[in-house]
Image (cartoon, grey):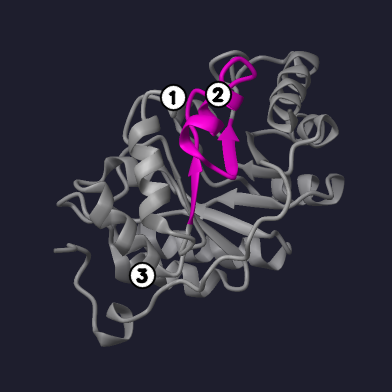
Amino acid sequence: MVHCAPADAAYSCLGAPLLETMTFGLLLEVAVDSLERAVAAERAGTNRLELCVDLEAGGLTPGIELIRQVRAAVRIPTHAMVRPRTGDFVYSAAEFAEMKASIKTIAAENLEGIVTGVLLSDGYVDVQRTRELVALASPMQVTFHRAFDQTSDFAAALECVIRTGAYRILTSGGAADAQTGATILRSLIHQAANRITILPGGGLHPGNIAEVARAIGAHELHTGLGEVIPYSSPDIAAFESAVKGCVAKLQT
């Protein structure tokens, strides 16, 4: 039995559309928290950016100035984090209102997507609230972020996220990193069956990203490279080199 947030009939029978078949190679998304890293990641060949601040805490909603700077400087798709604070993913009414206001702000800047998610206090996906955010963000794509890894039942949570209309799920399979969670990630991709994209992330770098991609069977991969380049590091050249390394590994 699938356990989700209580929802009325309008929510309970809705699912995500089938995804388009990917006819190209593996896609790399890189998490960045500055204009410099965003430009470097694009220059290195990444396909998509996840833009946020405070990456060391898992990422929070970026400010409007950073959004505008990155939007003006890069051409690749950019998805902004919508997470009002650190900690859990159970939000008060005021925090939820703040998230909706952030989505309206982001939409006005013509970004391609957002990264967000809401849970219930019992560890299940809050379908109704998350679906409100998905509807508000349309036509932007919505990635349900690693709140997924805090859910009580991954198989049930996958079905719940599909009901929200989200386009993809960023997850490490509940493990400390995607390599450790490879078995669960592979199972989630099989269960998803093209109804939603599973985006493995966590601990990926040039030394393991190709191996993990093959083991899981994923078409998209996510990294912030925090394990090899500290998020606080000002060494943009080293960051760019690491992104290039990931891109090269995924093209072989």
Q: What quarter of the picture does the C terminus occupy?
A: top right
Which type of secondary structure does the marked residue at label 3 adopt? helix
| Left or right position of 55 against 122 | right
Depth check, front residue: 212 or 163: 212
Separation (CA) of disc 3 from disc 1: 27 Å
**Residue 22 in the image, given as x and y percentages of width and height:** 66, 56
The answer to which quarter of the image holds residue 210 is top right
Mark 1 surroundings within 10 Å by alpha-carbon count, few (fewer than 14), some (14 through 19), many (20 or more)? many
Q: Is residue 146 magenta?
A: no
Mark 3 surroundings within 10 Å by alpha-carbon count, few (fewer than 14), some (14 through 19), many (20 or more)? many
**Residue 213 in the image, given as x and y percentages of width and height:** 55, 33
Disc 3 marks which residue? 163
Pointers 1 and 2 in contact (CB under 8 A)? yes
Disc 2 marks which residue? 211
Q: Earlier in the sequence, mark 3 or mark 2?
A: 3
Q: Earlier in the sequence, mark 1 or mark 2?
A: 1
Pointers 3 and 2 in contact (CB under 8 A)? no
Separation (CA) of disc 3 from disc 2: 31 Å
Depth check, front residue: 4 or 16: 16
Say which residue appears at 26% left-offset and 52% top-offset. 155
Q: What quarter of the picture does the N terminus occupy?
A: bottom left
Which type of secondary structure does the marked residue at label 2 adopt? helix
**Residue 52 visible, this orientation:** no
Residue 205's place in the image compared with 167, above or below, is: above
Which type of secondary structure does the marked residue at label 1 adopt? loop
| Number of callouts | 3
Disc 1 marks which residue? 179
Residue stretch rendered in magenta on the structure: 197-223
* Mark 1: amino acid: Gln
